[in-house]
Image (cartoon, helix red, strand yellow):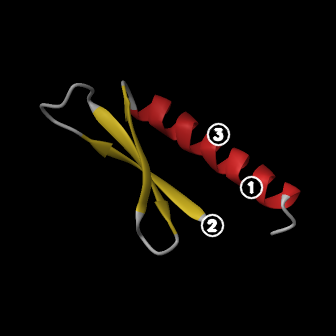
Amino acid sequence: MATGEVIPTPGGDMPFKVVMRHDDGSVMAEMPVASLQEGEAFIAEALRDLQDKAKEGGHL
């Protein structure tokens, strides 16, 4: 499966970024976001989408 984390990015273009990782720890995606709440919402939606795709593919 996957995990997501919201990380502060002081001095970056946006104040936070979301880092999505595979189970092995490798980064699958990074997304700059304006707020912690936006990042958390992005993670929740992304994980739901991944779960739905896994179910469709018979992996869950």
**Secondary element at image label 3:** helix
Front-most of residues 53 and 4: 53
Residue count near mark 1 (Cα–Cα under 10 Å), binned few <14, some 14–19, many ≥20? some
For label 2, the residue is: 1
Please give the name of the residue rendered at 51% of the width and 39% of the height, measured from the top-left corner: 40
Mark linked to residue 37: none
What x and y, as percent, mark residue 5?
A: 42, 52
Front-most of residues 14 and 29: 29
Cα distance in 3D space between marks 1 and 2: 8 Å
Residue type for callout 2: Met
Residue type for callout 3: Glu
Please give the name of the residue rendered at 15% of the width and 35% of the height, measured from the top-left corner: 10
**Secondary element at image label 2:** loop
Image vertical order of residue 28 relative to residue 31, above or below: below
For label 1, the residue is: 51
Residue count near mark 2 (Cα–Cα under 10 Å), binned few <14, some 14–19, many ≥20? few
Q: Earlier in the sequence, mark 1 or mark 3?
A: 3
- As drawn, the residue found furthest toward the front would be 57
- As drawn, the residue found furthest toward the bottom would be 24
Q: Earlier in the sequence, mark 2 or mark 3?
A: 2
Please give the name of the residue rendered at 47% of the width and 31% of the height, measured from the top-left corner: 37
Image vertical order of residue 58 relative to residue 10, above or below: below
Question: Horizontal placement of 32 versus 53: left or right?
Answer: left
Mark linked to residue 45: 3
Q: Are marks 1 and 2 in contact (CB under 8 Å)?
A: yes
**Secondary element at image label 1:** helix
Number of labels in the image equals 3
